[in-house]
Amino acid sequence: MDNKGRGDAGWNWPDIHPEGRKFGLITAGASLAAAFMAWETIAWPLAFLTLGVLAFFRDPERVVPQDERAIVSPADGVVSLIAQVEPPAELQGADGGLSAGPVTRISIFMSVFDVHINRSPIGGAVRRLVYIPGKFMNADLDKASEENERQHLLIERSDGVTIGFTQIAGLVARRIVPFVKPGDLLAVGQRVGLIRFGSRVDVYLPAGTDSKVLVGQKVIAGETVLADIGQQRLIEGVLQ
């Protein structure tokens, strides 16, 4: 069904992203080789590993909200932090970057069980894509935003609204794979890259915009609305 309830509801096996098919073929080949050699104690774990690899790189379709005010989640996962922070220097600047001064940052932690395809929170042009090498500490820690390997993206809409977000590698994640480059035009919810094997994404909301989600809330890339542009309100709640 689409986002207006049209069509027939159903479920299909999600596609496997090409980035993961090669890993699945490697583990599947190793499993078959072990089975051929009658090494069952090795063959079965490798078979389960193959299923795990394919599940990690699954790439399901998403129904993206068509609301010009909406900033959608760029990642599947759990909201781990919401804080008022200064945007990274790589996302600031007079040439279309974010303004200096505290803004709301929403951090989304992705476990190895989440979909790891990241999506654009708004539609617009890619103004910056900055890769920074770094450490591989636990991505759930606040300081991972400044010390871990990461990649900053800056997306600007035609009306000048600009959103910055950062893909952050974690303890197990060892590679950030971009699908886009500066100058590309993106639709809201379009795939922009992935992070292998557990990680985090930080989203920097525009000034004057507050979060609509809570710490501990599960969000879905391309579907969950993190905030409405220009809307400020205090949300209080306790997850049950």
Image: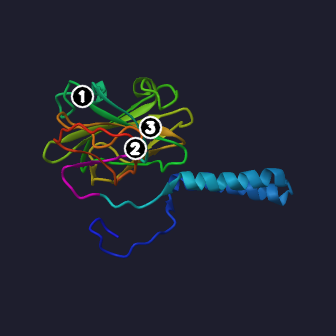
Q: CA distance from mark 1 to mark 2?
A: 28 Å
Select label 3 or label 2 by which is in front: 2
Please state the extent of the stretch shown in magenta in the rendering.
Answer: 65-75
Q: Residue at x 78, y 56 (%)?
A: 33
> For the stretch drawn in magenta, what is the main secondary structure?
loop
- Counting residues from the start of the chain, the first of labels 1 and 2 encountered is 1
- Tell me the amino acid under the disc marked 3: Arg
- How many numbered marks, from 0 up? 3
The label nearer to you, 1 versus 2, is 2
Earlier along the polypeptide chain: callout 3 or callout 2?
3
Crowding at mark 1 (Cα within 10 Å: few <14, some 14-19, many 20+): some
Q: Are marks 3 and 2 in contact (CB under 8 Å)?
A: no
Residue drawn at (14%, 42%), measured in percent from left and top? 160
Q: Is the C-beta separation of discs 1 and 2 under 8 Å?
A: no
Question: Which residue matches tag 2?
Answer: 217
Q: Amino acid at mark 1?
A: Gln
Asked whether 78 falls inside the magenta stretch, the response is no
The vertical placement of 14 against 186, above or below, is below
